[in-house]
Amino acid sequence: MTITVAEAIAISDIVINAVLIIGLANYIQKYQVNSRTLKDYFIKEIDKIHLELILFSEKMEDGNVVAQDVQNNFFRLVRKTTALTYLIDNKYKGSNAQQLVQNIVQLQYVVENDSTYIANYRTNNTFDFSPLTIDEIRFFAADSGKVFHELVVKVNNYSKNFL
Amino acid sequence: MKTLVIKEFLPRTGLRHFKTSDNSGEEFYHKYLNEYFASSYKSGEKLLVDLDGVRGYSPSFIDEAFGNLIFDFSLKVVSKLLEIKSDNFPVWKNNILQETYPSWEMKREKNELPKKTFAHDSWWRLNGNNLEKKVWILNSEK
């Protein structure tokens, strides 16, 4: 059976198109899977930090804390959050993830201005925060959810044109 | 450019005042930053302060250390001669520039004296255009 030139062109056209479509579909799917996997990872990490912050806030509210331990916890949280939000800001432009760090620093400012905290810092005795500071910690914990949730939404909804 | 790397002087950073904590912002300013900056002023060479390498900072440490610099030298002079570097703590660099600088410049303009909780040795201050060294403010804790 002989194939005409026209038929050969038509067949090769179909084959080339099929290869292109399959290749492109694979690429898009792989990109989407990688993109989704990465988003899920960052969202999980954001949630972990949020939970850590909530537990830390509850511990401070409950009292019987040691001033330098509180400070160390803030140091750790700021370092961790800075590292994570730096990556998020680089990957998902416009997410303003670094705002989370500023948020934590604001709580640190409130806590470390507490007069009982200051009075017990050097001796490192256990103490309770003043009722006013406890109130502010509670308010912060309730309010901070918004910043974390907003970031999760931004990461989740981020879309980059790659065509 | 001269460099002051904080971690080389303080193994750990404390709170605001000398009276309440070791390695306070007040102590860091009087022991190191004031002298280093005055030296930069005399030579006209910029001073780079590197915030990295320590475990972290308290907002009061940062505010007291860099705020006193503004009070003694003015925002105009400090902005010209001081650079702050931090890859690990961009939040502190931002807070210094956006909060500490303007609030302490306002204190300087109103002459709201910062509290000293230790009898410090004489330190440098720009008095008009003259760089002078003396005990400008006495220890308020007696």
Image: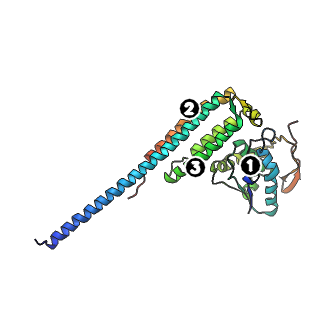
The residues tagged by marks 1 and 3 sit, at their Cα atoms, a distance apart of: 22 Å
Foreground residue, B41 or B15?
A: B15
Look at the numbered disc 1 and give the secondary structure of its residue: loop
* Left or right: A1 in relation to B131: left
- Residue pointed to by mark 1: B11
- Residue pointed to by mark 3: A83
* Left or right: B128 in relation to A70: right
- Residue B107 in view: yes
The chain ID associated with circle 2 is A
The residues tagged by marks 2 and 1 sit, at their Cα atoms, a distance apart of: 35 Å
The C terminus of chain A sits in image quarter: bottom left
- Residue pointed to by mark 2: A142
The chain ID associated with circle 3 is A
Check disc 2 and give the amino acid type: Ala
Q: Residue at x 54, y 38 (%)?
A: A50
The correct choice, above or below, for A65 with respect to A45 in the image is above
